[in-house]
Structure formats: structure tokens, C-alpha cells
Amino acid sequence: MAISNNGKFYNYNQTSKFNMHPITEAIRIRTEQTNEMEHSSPLFLTSSFCFDNTEEMRAAFADETDDNIYSRFSNPTVQEFVDRICALEGAETGYATASGMSAVFASFMTFLKKGDHLISCNAIFGSTHTIITKYLPKYGIEYTYVPAGNPETWASAIRPNTKMIYIETPTNPGLDIIDLEFAGKLARENKIILNVDNCFATPVNQTPIKYGADIVLHSATKWIDGQGRVLGGVIVGKKELIHEIYLYCRSTGPALSPFNAWVLSKSIETLDVRMERHASNALYIAQKLENHSKVFWLKYPYLQSHPQHAIALKQMKNGGGIICFDLKGGLESGRKFLDNLKILSLTANLGDTRSIASHPASTTHAKLTEEERLAVNITPGLIRISVGLEHRDDILNDIMQTLEKC
Ligand SMILES: Cc1ncc(COP(=O)(O)O)c(C=O)c1O
């Protein structure tokens, strides 16, 4: 039994009778087998569900039963995906959304109202920055940005109306690491919701709930899908908080498509093994590039040179699949680098089997001012590599040969 997104128990298979490792649970949890006895999970591609009579339907609408009503509220295929993420994150329950951004937005809109205050780490994904600075103020929600690399200053940003602390760790794209234990303690002591975007690390590498996060969210579009096919998002955490998110989403409609949920759920079965290879490839390449003559600095959480290396070792199982480095030649070299790559893709995604190079200053973080970019270490020559599953020497050679031209 798991807890469904409406906060009640949801029935699937026999799996939970056994005490299993979260990785095993995430692979074995599944929607109940149909009479066809299929091995792979069925896909419930349906908008709504039927009832035998008005009394059953009344009871479902009155929340007296767990029956599915409509796929904007719940769907067995989507629930399987949510339950698998909950197993990995150590969460009580969750709700899946159409994209990572709808998860971020729902997590803000559910808990913040006019007059409330949000503390956010300043190093966050570009569209999250847009929500915080452009849209939340329209609803009278105030915010304060705090520096990712300087958590000692965060306590002074807390006000009586502070309702939430929002962080990403590692941050996108600067790879700052935030001490989750510290953030968890600060939030707990001040009775503030700690909301963590765990997209970069993935739940097989880092579990923020263990350190006190109240809600954890993901862009499942990235490593969780892992093959650049579908968009998706998910929010997991404490039952009473997720129930509020469920009520918000049930009415406002950012539900995940059952088809995408089916794809993402299958991907979870290989997430742990994929992330190990992404991380070992990334560490190998980071070590080879660290002292390259064209590279000003390089960051990878599992390199000793990373400023928060000790925190990364404490809370992450490996260094993840992203490396970033600053080219000495600045903006012009950044452009040349992208234009001369032979294998790596130039595309607005990360977390794929195929390695991807990006130039945040001219793309994902272009909406920030130059000053805002520099505040979060997005220099004009910053290159972000999402290290794929190709042979590590092919990825490295493409980068090395391209650097010669920069
Ligand atoms: C850290 C982080 N959070 C959220 C998102 C948004 O996710 P999506 O593109 O699925 O809406 C992204 C996208 O790159 C991201 O990198």
C-alpha cells in the first residue's frame, strides 16, 4: 500500500509486503496487473473512469473512496510514477505535473499568498527566477534572494511573514552545493517550509527529505526521463502538504499525461544504473579538463577543488552528470566552442544519454541582467556540459579538440 495523491491508501501489487531497498521498490512498485497478466505495467490512457451506480460516484466525489474519477485528479499510470519517486525520495506521497516548471509554480501558489515572503537561493533555474521576480510580485508575494555560497547570511533574511525557503542543489548551471542539513535546520527552527528542487542530483543520488526538506520537486524531463523524450514534473513530501498541492492542481489542471507518466515510470527502472555511469564519465572528464590551458576554472562537485566539496561528499552519493567550466577567452570563445563541437549536441536540455553542451549566458539565463548572472557565477565564457552515456573518451576527445579552436 502507498498513499495516493489524495492522501489515502492506493492499492498496487504485493510489493510493499516486503522490506526492500528503495531502488528495488522503485523498480518493483507497479499498478495492479490486469487479467491479461502483462509483465510491463499497463498504460491507462483515459481521461475519466466509470462507476457502476450513482452511490459509488457520490462516494468518490465525497472523498469517501479512493476510486479514480478523472485523470486531472488521479490516474493509475501517473500514480505508479509518483509512488516510484516517493520510494526513492523517502516521501509519504506526491503529485505529478506536466513539467518541472508546473511543479515549481504549483509549489509556490499552493502555499504562498498576498503578504507572504519567500526566501530563495539566488542561483536557480532561469524560468524559476522569472516566476519569483515577475509573477509572484503580481500576487503581492515578496521575495529575498540569498547567496548560495554563503548560507550563514540566510537567517538574517527571515521575516515574520517568511513562509518558504526555496533552493536547488547542485544549482543550475553554477553547480553550487547547498548544505541540506543546514537548510533543514534553519527551516525547522523557524517553522518555514523547505522546498528543494532536486532535479540536478536526482533521488538516487540525494534525498533532501532526510535532511528536513518538507517538499521536494523535480523536472522529470531531465535525468529521470534520461532520453530527452517527454516533459514531466513531480512534487513529493509530507502528506498534509501534498494534499494541499493536490487540491490546488486538481482544480487548476497541470496534471501529467498518463502517456508521459508511463515513459517516465519505465525510466526510473534504469535511473540508478544510468546515474552511476553519467557520474563516472563526468568525473573522468572533469579530472582531465581541470588544468587545461584554455580553462579558467572548472567545477564538479566530486573534485577536491570544488568550494563545497565536503558538503557534496556528505549529501551526494556521486558528483552527478553535469560539469561546468569558464573559458579564458570569454563570450567569443564560448560561441566558438559550441560552434566547433562534432559529437556533443547543442540543445536546450540536460540529462540525456547524449552529451549536451550549452552556453547559459546566451540561452537559459539570458533574461538575467549581466550583474545578476555574475552574482551566480554565470560568466560570459561559462560552458555547461551534461555528460551522456557515450564512451567517455569520445566525449573527452570532442571537448579537447574543440578547446584547441577556442
Ligand atoms: C533545476 C531545474 N528545475 C526546473 C526546470 C524546469 O523543468 P521543465 O523544463 O521540465 O519545466 C529545469 C529545466 O531545465 C531545471 O534545470
Image (tube, rainbow, N blue to C red):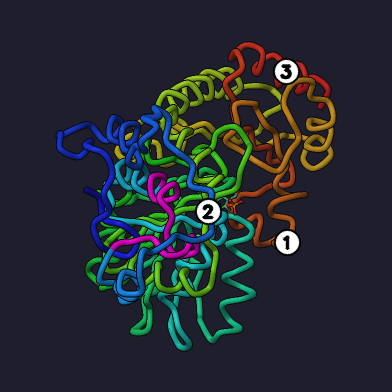
- Residue 367: assigned label: 1
Where residue 225 appears, as percent x and y from the top left, is: 53, 37
- Give whichever of discs 3 and 1 has the lower sequence position: 1
Residue depicted at x 67% and y 32%: 356
- Give whichever of discs 1 and 2 has the lower sequence position: 2
Q: Is residue 72 magenta?
A: yes
Q: Is residue 170 shown above or below 134?
A: above
SS of the residue under disc 1: loop
Query: Is 222 positioned to the left or the right of 87 in the image?
Result: right
In this view, the residue in front, 145 or 128, is 128
Residue depicted at x 60% and y 64%: 129
The span shown in magenta is 66-81
> Can residue 345 be seen here?
yes
Where residue 383 appears, as percent x and y from the top left, is: 68, 37
Tell me whether the residue at label 1 lies in contact with that at label 2, contact meaning CB atoms closer than 8 angstroms: no
Residue under label 3, please give it: 398
Mark 1 or 2, closer to the camera: 2
Residue depicted at x 83% and y 25%: 340
Query: Is 91 positioned to the left or the right of 103 in the image?
Result: left
